[in-house]
Amino acid sequence: MLDKFKLCLTSFALAISSISYASETIAIVNPYGPAHAAIPAMAKIIQEANMAQNDFVFILDYKPGGNQIIAVKHMDASPNNRLAIIAPGHVENINSGKLNHADYVPVHALGDACWAVISDKGTESGGIASLKGEKEILVGGVGFGNATHLTSLLASEKYGFRVKYIVFKSNHDALINMAGGHGINFVIERIESYESFKERNPKLNVLAASCPNRLTKAPHVKTLKEQDIDAPYIFNITIANQAMPVATRERLGKILNDATRKIGLNEITKLSGMSPPLFDNFDTNKFYSDRISRLSILVSKYAAAIKADKE
């Protein structure tokens, strides 16, 4: 009986070893720090993807900095077994010639964020318009030319204040700066993050919802679009270098999409405030093309202001 038990243990160990040996590690390179609001949802998707199959082991690999270029370049260095997450700042990197648009293809989309525009200036009842009269607003975000940067530039054009943009490892880090009264005046982050800091700093207010619909937790606050600011949304898309074999990236995309469906929209929204386009039957390629083209127009329009903030 003992011999049979030992044989079973040996067989089990060999099976696990075989699976581990056969599995290929796919690093999803993240341009943010671990505190970024989208991380919990992406981590959950990866966990589900790893449980659902044995061909690949997905891991998150954090490479923040460089206006998100570091993460993409790290993927480029090993295109057969790395993917990268991009956000709106990716478009500024393309427009500036630092990245080549043709080199990248979408694999999976975590989608748009439904987050809050938070400020220690202005009022909730007055919204973005309550910033009128301010001479300068210090804006915190994760990359030049991204959705937060462009939103602040659109607002500044409408209401006449200057924008100074400062890059942080995550929007959450920028919000911590604001909550501590260290200078930042304008951040886009999850409303749950705002709630956790409001008691510490009563000056914090939600001025707008940066998403198509009003925030469930702040239904009295108008969206940016309702306030006549047609700003882009924060989004996360996982891309591959075009050098990755088509069959491989299609397989990886299916695994990540299946995992996303399994978790469900409610859980993903609860974890990170994100809305994957597949729940709206919005193809990943179409979503990618739509978001990139829209951002390109705005990045080109505000190229001088973006350049000035970099200098």
Image (cartoon, rainbow, N blue to C red):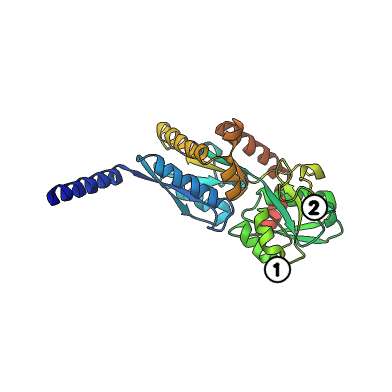
Question: Which mark is in front, 1 or 2?
Answer: 1
| Residue in the foreground of this view, choosing between 290 and 47 | 47
Give the amino acid at mark 2.
Ser
10 Å neighbourhood of mark 1: few (<14), some, or many (≥20)?
few
**Horizontal and vertical percent position of residue 127:** 81, 52
For residue 249, above or below residue 61: above
- Of the numbered discs in the image, which one, if any, rests on residue 200? 1
Nearer the observer, 230 or 190 = 190
Which residue does the image show at 49% across and 44% down from the upper left? 45
Q: Marks 1 and 2: CB-CB under 8 Å?
A: no
Side of 171 relative to 230 (left or right)? left
Left or right, 237 with respect to 58, comes to right
Residue 277: where, in percent of width, then height? 60, 36
Q: Earlier in the sequence, mark 1 or mark 2?
A: 2
Check disc 2 and report its element: helix, strand or loop. helix
Q: Amino acid at mark 1?
A: Arg
Q: Position of residue 210 (x, y in %)?
A: 71, 47
Figure quadrant of residue 15: top left
Tell me the residue that label 2 is attached to.
156
